Image (cartoon, rainbow, N blue to C red):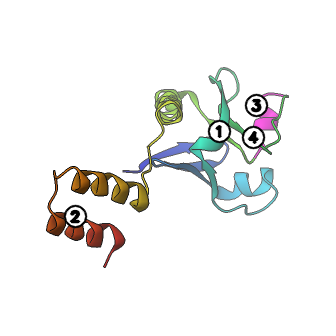
Amino acid sequence: MAKVFEFKSNGKFIVIVDDYSVKVQPKGIMNFMTLGGSKGEKSIPISSISAIQFKKPSITTGYIQFAYAGSIETKAGTLSAAADENSITFHKKDLAKAEELVALIESKRQNPIAQVSAADELKKFKELLDEGILTKEEFEAKKKQLLGI
């Protein structure tokens, strides 16, 4: 099930995390200006995220920056992060929410969802049929279910 986070700082960010991706939706006039126009939603596959940089807010806003193959990481701190499409900025009042977001993504990076194909499932059920654990009728019913017929 997807979890939605909303951050308001110089701009507004809606972040949606599901089992497979992080979707970042920059909103508002400030994001329009700092990100160079309307960027729309950015979807980053969790399996592609190689690092997450997290800076707590102090005098300036905090930020979360996602690094992945092909992304360009800004090195100049909060001001550069505000103009980076791979970053989310947030105020002190949203610190707990930002920490929760980072923890959620980190947990999904460390525990990827195993995807089993219908073919793999069929192989397993065929083995059960061959071993006499399943009847031919049970195997055929499962086969139809997996293949959607």
> Which residue is the site of mark 3?
78
Mark 3 or mark 1, whichever is nearer to me: 1
Question: Of the residues tagged 3 and 2, which is closer to the observer?
Answer: 2
Could you say which is closer to the camera, residue 85 or residue 95? 85
Q: Are marks 4 and 3 in contact (CB under 8 Å)?
A: yes
Give neighbour class at mark 1: few <14, some 14-19, many 20+ (Cα, 10 Å).
some
Q: Nearer the viewer, residue 144 or 110?
A: 144
Residue in view at x 46 percent, y 49 percent: 18
Residues at badges 2 and 1 in contact (C-beta under 8 Å)? Answer: no
Q: Secondary structure at mark 1?
A: strand
- Queried whether the magenta region covers residue 67, the answer comes back as no
Q: Amino acid at mark 1?
A: Ile
How far apart in space, not on screen, are marks 3 and 2 (Cα)? 58 Å
On the question of residue 47 being in view, the answer is: yes
Pointer 1: what residue? Answer: 49
Quadrant for residue 48, please give it.
top right
Q: Earlier in the sequence, mark 3 or mark 2?
A: 3
